[in-house]
Amino acid sequence: MPIVRNKKIEVLYSVEAIARRNHELAEEIALGDLSNLLVISILKGSFVFAADLIRALHRAGLAPEVEFISVSSYGAGTEAGKIRLLRDVETDVKGRDILLIDDILESGNTLKFTRDLMLERGARKVAIVALLDKSMKRRAPISADYVGFECPDKFVVGYGMDVGHAFRELPFVGVVTGDA
Ligand code: IMP
Ligand code: MG
């Protein structure tokens, strides 16, 4: 079991499993009818996944433009489901086919907020890819068009995802199981 920052990490999705799945996802996405594709990576959690997925999309024959958006849920104690826009895209999305990339689809609030924002701005089509889907935690009426892995109800770290700003650098997805 890997030990990082003096914590034991159980590997849930290995480097190899993620690479294989990214390739399959890109092939699936390339079959969809998305033209003049604009991918939008939802920061911060999806930046590693997005970096790998856009290169897999290239190998699958697509030539996406890449954008970033940063959103955050309001802190504890505020109304559930409220999302705040921290950093906007710089591209006019009117008439565009968009692929939103996120790390985890959990309550669905983040992706519903972001998808609705793009549709309000006149995007032609908004598809969603999430590396992980915790479907048992869904609250908002939303699903992903493309899912890497159905994720158990555990708090995961690595491959861009953090707990308290730590572990984003891990090349795999895992769960912190205790002190080493
Ligand atoms: P939701 O779908 O709006 O509830 O939010 C999902 C967001 O919460 C994801 O984009 C992640 O950034 C974060 N998140 C949810 N579950 C986890 C986890 O297990 N580890 C790290 N971040 C998580
Ligand atoms: Mg996120």
Image: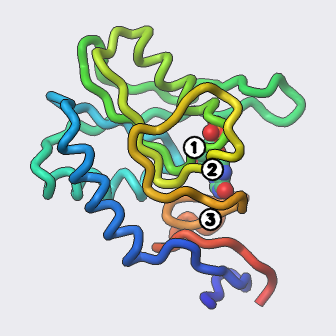
The residue that appears at 21% across and 51% down in the rendered structure is: 57
Residue beneath disc 1: 105
Verify CB contact (< 8 Å) between mark 1 and mark 2.
yes
Q: Which mark is residue 157?
A: 3
- Splitting the image into 4 quarters, where does residue 122 fall? top left
Horizontal and vertical percent position of residue 11: 58, 79
Alpha-carbon span between mark 3 and mark 1: 14 Å
Q: Specify whether tag 2 is near ligand 1 (CB below 8 Å).
A: yes
Confirm whether residue 163 shows in the render. Answer: no
Horizontal and vertical percent position of residue 9: 66, 80
Q: Which mark is residue 134?
A: 2
Q: In the rendered image of this protein, does residue 171 appear above or below residue 59?
A: below
Alpha-carbon span between mark 3 and mark 2: 14 Å
Q: Specify whether tag 3 is near ligand 1 (CB below 8 Å).
A: yes
Confirm whether residue 64 shows in the render. Answer: yes
Front: mark 3 or 1: 1
Q: Crowding near pointer 2: few (<14 within 10 Å), some, many (20+)?
A: some
Q: Specify whether tag 1 is near ligand 1 (CB below 8 Å).
A: yes
Horizontal and vertical percent position of residue 177: 76, 78
Horizontal arrangement in the rendering, residue 46 relative to residue 107 (left or right): left
At mark 2, the secondary structure is loop
The residue that appears at 23% across and 57% down in the rendered structure is: 56
At mark 3, the secondary structure is loop
